[in-house]
């Protein structure tokens, strides 16, 4: 998510392919090092939706379709 | 002659100093802060509109149908609280169900679901300090999605990050109460329409026939 732009595709690939997975891991770390938070949208029973906050690539469910990065929360006014 | 020239030079210097000193001072401050002059990016309504449209698409793809319809129709999303004793550090709710209202770029409001008693406001922002287009502010729907993800993903962390205030700090409690009433009406209508649709009758949605 970016101000003035909205959604930006950062990287995509198949985690079953070693080269792709490595690239995704590097990009994941780069985003977290830049201070962003990461979340994976999930679909539960009966259409219930939620998100899972992830702090490392290993936390990302293997079957996840996407990881969304967004600026970390800060106390507002 | 020399005296006149000297006086003119002094006056010129004084005038120039008045003009130049602030600029020199600003440049010095900038140099000390190690910052470069950032190019000013003008506000582009078209760009912001496109950003918001992308953000709405992303939000719609993440939340469920009811939440999306709620945001589309009412302008906010309700998220149920998941902590057994209510949101921290608001004090216990005695196990009563509670929820949050998420508004774009406004505080998150916690309330008791049954009585609609407002518990707290949680002021939280997601500023992008890189300011890619001159602003640190996410599009409205991205702000809602960020709050939704943070609340459903790690409610405790978000609540502890936010600045907690009593109701009324940022949002008018009367407006929030009105929104809760609107939500109840909206849910009743939606349930009725869904019930009619599932039972095969579509009278509520069918265009009226002229009699």
Image (cartoon, rainbow, N blue to C red):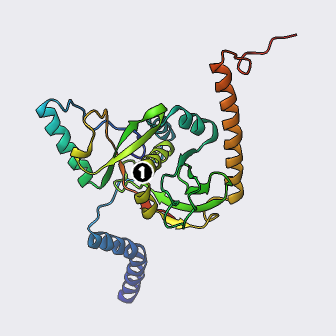
Task: Check the image and name the residue furthest to the front.
Answer: B95
Chain at numbered mark 1: B
Disc 1 designates what residue? Answer: B150
Which residue sits at x=42%, y=61%? A74
For this rendering, which residue is in front, B58 or B199?
B199
At label 1, counting other C-alpha atoms closer than 10 Å, the crowd grade (few under 14, some 14-19, many 20 or more) is many
Q: Position of B178 compared to A36: left or right?
A: right
Which residue sits at x=73%, y=21%? B204
Which residue sits at x=46%, y=62%? B162
Vertical position of residue B9 compared to residue B194: above or below:
below
Query: Residue B68 sits in which quadrant?
Result: top right
Task: Check the image and name the residue furthest to the left.
Answer: A18
Percent of width and height locating residue B174? 72, 57
Q: Secondary structure at mark 1?
A: helix
Q: Quadrant of the N terminus of chain B?
A: bottom left
Residue A36 seen in this snapshot: yes
Q: Quadrant of the C terminus of chain B?
A: top right
Percent of width and height locating residue B10? 38, 84
Q: Position of B37 compared to B91: left or right?
A: left
């Amino acid at each position: 998510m970016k101000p003035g732009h909205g959604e930006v595709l950062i990287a995509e690939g198949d985690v079953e392919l070693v080269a792709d997975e490595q690239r995704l891991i590097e990009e994941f770390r780069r985003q977290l090092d830049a201070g962003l938070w990461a979340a994976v949208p999930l679909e539960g029973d009966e259409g219930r939706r939620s998100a899972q906050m992830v702090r490392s690539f290993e936390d990302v469910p293997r079957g996840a379709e996407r990881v969304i990065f967004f600026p970390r929360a800060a106390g507002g006014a | 002659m020399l005296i006149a020239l000297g006086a003119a030079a002094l006056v010129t210097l004084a005038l120039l100093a008045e003009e130049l000193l602030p600029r020199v001072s600003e440049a010095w401050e900038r140099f000390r802060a190690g910052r470069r002059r950032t190019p000013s990016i003008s506000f582009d309504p078209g760009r912001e509109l496109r950003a918001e449209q992308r953000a709405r698409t992303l939000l719609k793809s993440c939340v469920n149908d009811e939440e999306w319809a709620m945001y589309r129709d009412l302008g906010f999303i309700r998220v149920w609280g998941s902590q057994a004793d209510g949101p921290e550090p608001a004090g216990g709710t005695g196990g009563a169900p509670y929820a949050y209202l998420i508004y774009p770029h406004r505080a998150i409001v916690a309330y008791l679901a049954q009585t609609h008693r407002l518990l707290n406001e949680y002021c939280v922002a997601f500023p992008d300090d890189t300011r890619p287009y001159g602003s640190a502010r996410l599009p409205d729907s991205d702000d809602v999605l960020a709050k939704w993800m943070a609340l459903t993903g790690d409610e405790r962390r978000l609540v502890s990050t936010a600045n907690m205030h009593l109701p009324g700090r940022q949002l008018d409690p009367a407006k929030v109460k009105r929104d809760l009433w609107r939500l109840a009406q909206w849910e009743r209508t939606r349930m009725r329409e869904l019930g009619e649709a599932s039972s095969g009758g579509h009278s509520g949605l069918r265009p009226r026939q002229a009699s």
